[in-house]
Image (tube, helix red, strand yellow):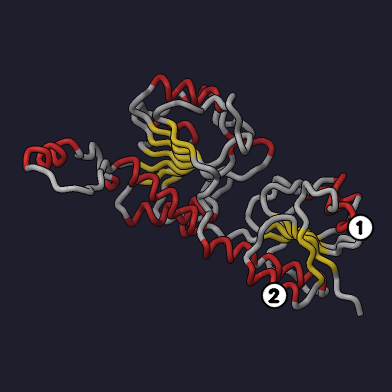
Amino acid sequence: MALPLVVVTEELHPEAIAWLEARCEVVGCPAHSPDLGGALASAEGLIVRTYTKVDAELLARAPRLKVVGRAGVGLENIDLGACRERGIAVVHTPDANTGAVVEFVVATIFDALRPRVFLDKPMELPVWQTLRNELVAKREVGELVLGIVGLGRIGSRLARAAAGLGMTVHYHDVREIEPSARHGAEPATLDRVMTASDIISIHVDGRPENARFLDAALLSRMKPEVVFVNTSRGFVIDNFALADFMIGHPEALAILDVHEPEPFGVDYPLLDIANVHLTPHIAAATAPAKARMSRVVEDVWRVLSGETPRWRAEA
């Protein structure tokens, strides 16, 4: 009997590919390749990451498709409604990168608050003393208030880490969170989180109503020395409003790992602002996290085998 064909459009861990190849015919074909249509015509499975758009047009080229696997968390690039209408299962890896993203956020917070230099040559005592007198942190993490917008998997893990550092943690979420899942974080209104927090970390999902909900009215209420971190989705922020705030508050710092669009061009309003630090969507970029995300192949195989997947996406 012929093996089911699975098309993979973006890079997966080699061990995951080898695991899948032992059970399926696997074809690697980038989303922009002219060969994609031919590959999809016979495909029963499709595995993507972030930059392959799975919409009705793509699905129309895949008449035999049974399952779409997203190696990662967010599902904004997949039309869940179109998949549901076709009876196509969508599976993903919702907890694969939680620890990696939390590590990144904590690292950026420390980096923002603790000035340092690395020495590569001997120096005279006066220079040594000058450095020790100049490289003094203005604030300690344990004395600060962390505001978390979105207390899901990543937000709640961050709350637990922050509590271990002695921080006061407030959070806002559209859902009611059980006290046992808050890790000491206190619920607050969104306005309270934005106005009272020394550090704000954004962890919201990709639902359409979150588009630019962090607008000028909210951003303008942040503290003048706020550290603002976004590792969730770029489109949830009004970029022009954030640019205006950062230019007007040089003591503040924004660290943005996600952007709208990706990659951004020369007209990106947050470019060339001294207190805005931009990173290329790398918060989840650890080798262990990438390996865990690639294990979506297991749920793809479960669907193709007629079994119940472990992580089926909610439509």
- Callout 1: SS: loop
For the question of whether residue 188 can be seen, the reply is: no
**Disc ID at residue 19:** 2
Residue shown at 57% from the left, 27% from the top: 268
- Residue 207 is situated, as x and y percent measured from the top left of the image, at 67, 42
Left or right of 198 on screen, residue 73 = right
Residue shown at 62% from the left, 38% from the top: 262
For the question of whether residue 139 can be seen, the reply is: yes
| Residue that lies at the very extreme toward the left in this rendered image | 125
Q: Residues within 10 Å of mark 1 (few under 14, many from 20)?
A: some
Judging by the rendered image, the residue that carries numbered circle 1 is 41
Cα separation, mark 1 vs mark 2, equals 23 Å
In the rendered view of the protein, which quadrant contains the N terminus? bottom right
- Residue 247 is situated, as x and y percent measured from the top left of the image, at 42, 21
- Frontmost residue, 113 versus 21: 21
Q: Amino acid at mark 1?
A: Ala
Position of residue 215 relative to residue 293, above or below, is above
Left or right of 124 on screen, residue 282 = right
